[in-house]
Image (cartoon, grey):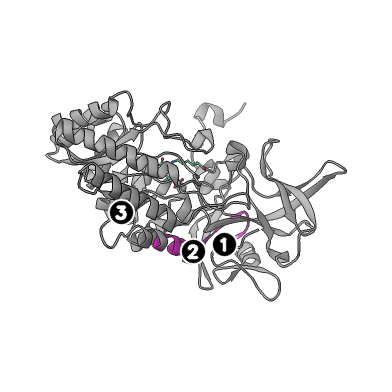
Amino acid sequence: MRLQGTMQVNEEGRLTIGGCGVEQLARQFGTPLYIFDEAHIRENCRQFYQSFGVAAGYSRVIYAGKAFLTTAMCRIIASEGLGLDVVSGGELYTALTAGFPAKDIFFHGNNKSYAELCQALEAGIGRFVVDNFAEMELLSRLAAERGQKARVILRITPGIEAHTHKYIRTGQIDSKFGFTLPNGQAMAAAQRVKELPGLEFKGLHCHIGSQIFELEPYSQAAATMLELAAQIKAATGLITTELDLGGGFGIYYTNEDRPCSIREYAETILGRVKEEARALNLPVPQVIVEPGRSIIGPAGCTAYTVGTIKEIPGVRKYVAVDGGMTDNIRPALYGAKYEAIIANKAARPPVETVAVTGKCCESGDMLIWEAKLPRVEAGDILVVTATGAYGYTMSSNYNRLGRPAAVLVYNGSADLIIKREDFNDLLRNDVLPPRLSNPE
Ligand code: LLP
């Protein structure tokens, strides 16, 4: 069990985060509750900012909003000098509503709609990461109609396989994303950008996958992409001034995970880009990275209240909490592993191994199959750590459970950043046709 960020166990043996007692937070805001540690989020942003040399102009760090995005999060990201990667009209709307500078927004996605492209052009966003030919043609037309130049980065599928779960692997050829490199589509895309009006070529992008612990795939991606940049330059004269290598930097969830430091990722990537650019006689492009999980994952956790406990002697002990796959689908979807701590027994050593399950009507509704904990009792506040990324953003209302609230803790104070959904919220979109309203 690792205490992340500002998590501490106080003299009374109770868990605090950002100077706030977790039990008090649970009492004040209810459970399940997502707790975000602002100091830790900012620390992670600064690690990226400094390691990648953003101030010196070598790089840009673009936070991948899909990991966790709210208006408050947008404010934090903007104040740390990071840009923002959005993948939908909804994420873009959130960012614009929060006053996020449009020029620092990158728009991703393999199926951007007409309406989304219009919305992004009207907002004047910084970069369109163009994924396919149909999008390129449409964007060109819409930008030209408006007398605008859309600044474009081409998403390339480089054919690099990273060792991660197949659902979150994206660098391999058989992928729904991007222009395929080895079959010539990537080069054809560059040629087309040059011909079309309304587009300004800025560079190339790839994202090899997520929760990657090795440095080598990044180094390889940098080299492969620069080789492509050299071929594009030779064939079209277009210069890759920006090289976006995506996100995917691995984090600690359990003691099976051994992440590299952000500095190691930065040194590997920046070093290889410089080296290859020199070797190919290309100007060194500005490097862009798009971390999501590594900024917000370790800085968030989820507090639950323990309810029923079922012991099957000789088999397993199930400890049920008041949330589950609705607020964290990752164990069910990817077999993701987590650790837990009991906030009110944080100094006690583990004495039993239990299975932490949710309250949904589904056997796969598991949070942790083997959690080592002090003796667990109903009413305990159980905290699952490192749930900050892809927890809330992939949450659902399965079984008509309302989504939990989220609080931001900092220096002893706690602010609500997402309200808990109540029964009225669950009915908000229900429509009762008149012919069903008056049953005979
Ligand atoms: N850039 C692009 C183009 C991406 O597709 C992604 C993630 C990122 C950046 C950020 O990757 P990160 O640094 O967060 O690993 N729901 C899955 C993860 C899906 C990631 C999708 N793309 C999960 O819960 O593990």
Q: Is residue 34 magenta?
A: yes
Q: Give coordinates of residue 104: x percent, y percent.
A: 28, 52
Residue annotated with mark 2: 40
Foreground pick, 205 / 80: 205
399 left or right of 237?
right
Foreground pick, 152 / 56: 56
Work out how far the residue at label 1 is from the one at label 3, CA to CA, in angstroms: 26 Å
Q: Give coordinates of residue 373: x percent, y percent.
A: 74, 56
Residue at x-position 66% and y-position 65%: 23
What SS does tag 2 mark? helix
Mark 2 is surrounded, within 10 Å at the Cα level, by few (under 14), some (14 to 19) or many (20 or more) other residues, namely many
Cβ at disc 2 under 8 Å from ligand 1: no
Residue annotated with mark 1: 4
What SS does tag 3 mark? strand
Residue at x-position 41% and y-position 46%: 247
Based on the displayed image, in which of its 4 quarters is residue 135 positioned?
top left
Residue annotated with mark 3: 60
Looking at the image, can residue 93 be seen?
Answer: no
**Three-letter amino acid code at the position of disc 1:** Gln
First to last magenta residue range: 30-46
Q: Is residue 308 magenta?
A: no
The quadrant the N terminus occupies is bottom right
Work out how far the residue at label 2 is from the one at label 3, CA to CA, in angstroms: 20 Å
